[in-house]
Amino acid sequence: MRPLAIFGGTFDPVHLGHLSVAWEASELLDADVRLMPASVPPHRPAPTANAAQRVAMLRAALQKQGRLAVDTRELERSGPSYTIDTLSELRAEQGDRPLVLLIGADAFAGLPSWHRWQALFEVAHIGVLSRPGVEAELPAALLAEIAARRVDDAATLRSLPAGKVIELSVTPLEISATRIRELLAEGRDPRYLLPCGLFDDPAVLAPYRNA
Ligand code: ATP
């Protein structure tokens, strides 16, 4: 069955690193991908752009293609959005369809600090996206948890609803939202690190220029 993949993040702002790895993951897994902006990320400082602004940037970025969509459910919930709650909700909606949580290699190494992280494997697979500049030294608890879960081929993943871990070798792009926010705050114009739709309306990037 064609999997549904979820790519969560702050997307403050969404950049070509996010979009390119999400696109390639969609191709490698033959999956639909939903980019899911987080409202109150449990481990992160508050985003510079508010929720509505981050959604507007995602919508502007995702025009004229059919593989990637935006899912705003975490923004509509009050309180912290734990990934386990979101995935459990999706599991209830999607029946036995394979679900894949896409995580960058940096975020994956920190998985054991996530709320009920081991339960994630009961509701979804995890697809780990390679990210340049990340020395992925995995903690022992995570290595032990994934030892019997690793698979190399997407076909295995498609045949089960949850429980496997796959490394997805995506084209390395050393782009981060932190760097983009710095450039914008300095009055620079990171035009080709961001999707061109973000430049159509000058108001879209204003929160970062005035930060
Ligand atoms: P920040 O610099 O603000 O921390 P970010 O660029 O890491 O932001 P997030 O919204 O925090 O972006 O990331 C969401 C997800 O995207 C995370 O799983 C992260 O690892 C992944 N990700 C972001 N940029 C890349 C990239 N260039 N290559 C691979 N994965 C990425």
Image: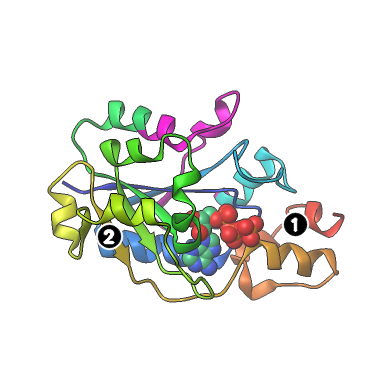
Q: Is residue 114 above or below residue 194?
A: above
Q: Where is residue 46 in the image (x, y as percent from the top left)?
A: 71, 43
- Left or right of 63 in this view: 168: left
Q: Which amino acid type is shown beneath numbered disc 1?
A: Leu
Residue at horizontal 85%, vertical 69%? Answer: 186
* Residue 107 x/y as whole percent: 49, 56
**Nearest the eye: 58 or 86:** 86
Residue 111 visible to the viewer = yes
Instruction: Kindly identify which residue carries mark 1.
Output: 205
Eyeballing the image, is 37 above or below 136?
A: above
Picture coordinates of residue 182 (x, y %)?
A: 77, 66
Task: Return the residue nearer the eye: 41 or 39.
Answer: 41
Q: Which of marks 1 and 2 is in front?
A: 2
Q: Mark 2 points at which residue?
A: 166
Q: Is mark 2 on a helix, strand or loop?
A: strand
Residue interval drawn in magenta: 59-87
Q: What residue type is labelled 2?
A: Ile
Up/down of 62 relative to 91, above or below: below
- Seen from this angle, which residue lies furthest front? 140
| Residue closest to the eye, 92 or 65 | 92
Q: In which quarter of the image is ligand 1?
A: bottom right
Marks 1 and 2, how far apart in space? 35 Å
Q: Quadrant of residue 97?
A: top left
Drawn side of residue 27 relative to residue 194, left or right: left
Q: Is residue 15 above or below residue 55?
A: below
Which residue appears farthest toward the top when viewing the image? 78
Structural crowding at the residue carrying mark 1, measured as other residues with C-alpha within 10 Å and reported as few (<14), some (14–19) or many (≥20): some
